[in-house]
Image (cartoon, rainbow, N blue to C red):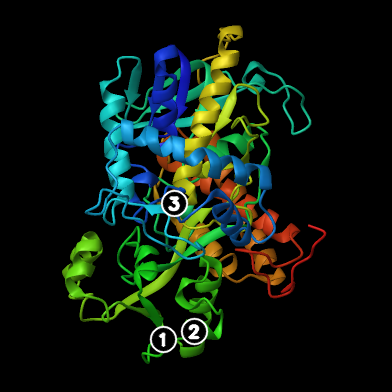
Amino acid sequence: MTQKFDYLVIGSGIAGMSFALKVADKGKVALVCKEKLDEANTFYAQGGIASVTDATDNFQKHIEDTLIAGDGHCDPAVVEKVVREAPAQIAELLRWGVDFDKTEDGDFDLHREGGHSEHRILHHKDNTGAEIQMSLVKKVRAHRNIQVFEHHFTIEIITQHHLGQIVTHHTPNIECYGAYIMNQKDRIISTFLSKVTLLATGGIGNVYLTTSNPTIATGDGIAMAHRARAMIRDMEFVQFHPTVLYNPNERPSFLITEAMRGYGAVLRDVKGNEFMYKYDQRGSLAPRDIVARAIDNEMKLAGSDFVYLDVRHKDPDETRDSFPTIYEKCLLLGIDITRDLIPVVPAAHYLCGGIVVDMDAHTSIKRLYAAGECSCTGLHGANRLASNSLIEAVVYADAASKHAEKIIGNLSFQNNIPDWNDEGTSLPEEMILITQSVREVEQIMSAYVGIVRSNLRLQRAMKRLEILYQETEELFQRSVVSREICELRNIISVAYLVIKQASQRKESRGLHYNIDYPDKNENF
């Protein structure tokens, strides 16, 4: 079956939904998500969204904070674009019904997080992402031009490759004509043709054993774009959130927002000693890469599985009011955060690299855009400044919508696309062939390509991954398509890109730390 839409949006977080809302008055929109509409990385963002909104703050301070966190690898023009356009996008989120906390005086109740020189984080309690997600869901469902496809899995984006042409990274003028998409309820694969496609598929957290990301974060958009020969960059810069709740039986790991350290929480080792000032003069408010490596080192020195976050010295009522979700979650595990230390550990959290886009969110493939965590704009550089990701997503969704509006009138549908061909395939004999390979990828990445890396670890990781790649491609060729095998293919592709690009970087910078190259190399 073939369906046609002016705009095809793959992913239902802040990037995908805000883009859909911005273009919906100008054409027919398909919004595709592999779970329910409200299940996206955005939903799990606790801390907030960064923007200059207070008179004591200014654009230059936000720009400088972002550049410092990015460790010399940001694109200054992009940083300026996002910071200066942020207030207008905050205003649009407010018009869409997003409710940010305010003081009794009616001003925004701004938080401060690690790496920020000012209080500039707008938030809704400690569940800002959920507030944004649910507000946008209401707007999307109410718009007559947006058709939502829940429980639909995108298998591949469609290019000239599917018309029988050989497409390589050197092929000029690669174009995207839509995507092959599977209804997970009946496994029917349809051809979605589009004039414009946006990838907004989120992150890659589930490439690792421990992650704060929801289970849907398997790098699907990046892997599809890579197979379509789009440019991918900076995959070595994987941000590990320093503080998720230590609870080995839970996946995804429960995030303890960085705003809690901005609020005054202090990191302590298992003996109760504060340790961050040994590593950075900013103490517990140092940027995430420094804090994550410090925690990793303290755990190794002590042979412990976690360190502690201490908020006991703060006013209990204020703590409960500011962090109700965290308070209730910890209480379920017998931890009263107003009286007890909170056991925390780093976890894979955010990818600073991804599909390369220009200032219009356009990829190296014509008619294909990317926004949100799956994209690489140049804003984050080697390390994302806390709470910059949500604002980046909506700023670049806006850029994509404006660029698409200019060109869509000159675009038409590619009508000779063949249906998905699964001739000669059968159901996998044993699901263990897939689930065990997933576990192996997670173990390889966590053991060898985590917070601290080395040449030997990266070499071992690549050798083991190559075996899994060959086995999985053989299985895919003879199997009926399923979400499980597609996700396995995708995490292998993403893991390959992380290892390859980490191996090519002969230095340590930001989130990438290689003990064989501990210093920065200014030639990169």
Amino acid beneath label 3: Ala
The N terminus appears in which quarter of the rendering? Answer: top left
Find out whether the residues at labels 1 and 3 contact each other: C-beta distance under 8 Å: no
* Separation (CA) of disc 1 from disc 2: 7 Å
Q: Earlier in the sequence, mark 1 or mark 3?
A: 3
Q: Residue furthest toward the right?
A: 523
Q: Which of marks 1 and 3 is in front?
A: 3
Residue placed most toward the observer, 486 or 36: 36
Residue, disc 3: 55
Per the rendering, the mark at residue 269 is 1
Find out whether the residues at labels 1 and 2 contact each other: C-beta distance under 8 Å: yes
The C terminus appears in which quarter of the rendering? Answer: bottom right
Amino acid beneath label 1: Asp
For residue 354, what is the image quadrant? top right
Amino acid beneath label 2: Glu
For residue 361, what is the image quadrant? top right
Residue, disc 2: 298
Residue placed most toward the observer, 388 or 160: 388
